[in-house]
Amino acid sequence: MGTLTRIGKYEIAEQIGMGGFGVVYKAWDPYIQRWVALKTCNATDPETTQRFFREAQLAGNLQHPNITMIYDFGVENDTPYFVQEFLSGVDLDELMGKQPLSLQATLAILLQVCAGLEYAHSRGVVHRDIKPANVRVLEDGTVKIMDFGIAKSLQSESRLTQTGVALGTAGYLSPEQLSGKPIDHRSDIFALGVMAYEMVTGVRPFAGPNLSNIIYQILNQEPVPPRQRNKNCPERLEKAILKCLAKDPAKRFANVRDFARELKMVVQELPTLGPRAETTTAIVRSELARLAGHSPLEITSATQLSAAPLEHYPTEPVQPLRRRWPWPYVLVGTALVLAGGGYVLFFGEKERQTGAYVAATPVPKPTPTPSTPTPPPVVQTVQVELVITPPAEVEVDGRPLGRVASSTLSLTPGAHRFRFRIPGFLDRSEEVEVRPDQPRLVFDLPRFGLLNVLPDMDVPIRGAEVFLDGKPLGSLPVSGRKVAVGEHRVEVSWPDGSKFEALVVVKDTVPTHLVVRPGGGSS
């Protein structure tokens, strides 16, 4: 599309992703005044275009707090696009890559995914590509299911996917998907079980050196029980996960709600050292703070974003502790009080009768001298305008601000620690001095573009490794990798010793494609 500035009414800010159908942009809606994600379809074949239209139609009819919301749809210069809510936060696969999630957070995330899936299934829609990369965890603790690009409506027949063609990520595909058999919502339950297994144990239940090995395991082998990989996994949770992973769909949970009910029972059986958070969003929010290095006590209670029955955690409110005294001591104490009262009544009256009783003169209480309250110290702050190019996820003194292009914040004069993250490309920190006479801070971060290294026909990909400037980039093909703007040397090597080399210039305006051709040629 060249250097875009506008698609329809939407002002393009930057490219934030690229998928099988086209490009995803961060854009600004000038009328409603909000950031949105705009997804285009660059494919020309009718099948892919129809699938793109179907994604917009299916997802656009799903209105649920745990499903990404579709705002708009249109066509610009023969290129279809749709507009959805812009999601800050982090994908679940990236979150899982930081460090192991707590069991409470794992259950809270799974319960929110269950809520969104149960709603989609009730509307006759099967996602068919549930995996951590399609689950987004927002800063406020909300979990969103993304990308219904290969979803299938059970209420209408579709021939877009040929029999035997498996879409999605192999490790999460159900046996019936790999066998080309008819599928229903229980395929999503299988993928949900794979994701739950991975979140609990840190590894996938079906993994191998190549695609054929993974497919064979899914079709023929039972996974290692989760408790053998993580002894802290509750037995009830292990049984629920393994039931999701049953080869026969009839032996899995009949619906997502039944699986969620088991998860809630696991939650209720967990030992606790104090009051639990009231919602799954609060639990996830606390986990994000823990992973970022904060204390969970710094996290305020999350907003009630969903009224779904699966949202409440736990189902019963926590009651305050009441001190109970042993009943014998209560009886003795009561007797002493009564005896003391009888003594005063009896002997006091007797002293009055004999004249020996002298009334005590009350001592007046001194009048307190009013004191002037000490005013709280005035903390001087500076309104700082923060400008970051290109936009990045920002933390200031450990406090996350989310993805920032420009923002205004209040800071005290002095040194502050800034951290900038562009997932998959940049993570750096620096100390910055904030001064009242310098209310604007501008950070020029390294610019990047998206590099795709794709094999031409007859180019083998098995065992092919890609290197960028001598550093490993991954296995062939490489798609949507963030690379610094400028000239780079790309090398592809095969196990037999053959190599491919080429120079490529990466730009930040359009994706850069490098096609590996037989004999060393490229384009």
Image (cartoon, rainbow, N blue to C red):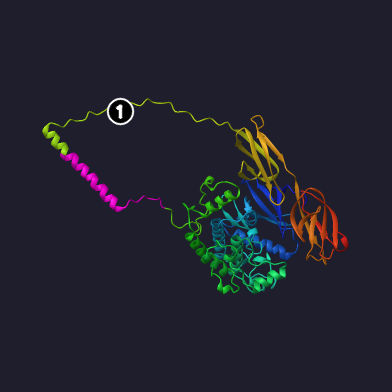
From the top left corner, tell me how far across and down residue 324 is, in percent: 34, 51
Residue 477 image offset from top left, x and y in percent? 77, 61
Residue 502 part of the magenta-drawn span: no
> Where, quadrant-wise, is the C terminus in this rendering?
bottom right
Name the residue beneath numbered marker 1.
365
Q: Is residue 63 above or below residue 335?
A: below
SS under mark 1: loop
**x then y, percent, for residue 157:** 63, 70
Res. 227 image quadrant: bottom right
Q: Is residue 343 magenta?
A: yes
Q: For mark 1, does the 10 Å Cα neighbourhood hold few (<14), some (14 to 19), or many (20 or more) residues?
A: few
Mark 1 residue type: Lys
Specify start and end residues of the magenta stretch as a single range: 319-346
Q: Quadrant of residue 317?
A: bottom left
Predominant SS along the magenta part:
helix
Q: Nearer the viewer, residue 69 or 200?
A: 200
Q: Relative to residue 319, is residue 444 drawn left or right?
A: right
Which residue is at a point 22% across and 28% down the rendered structure image? 361
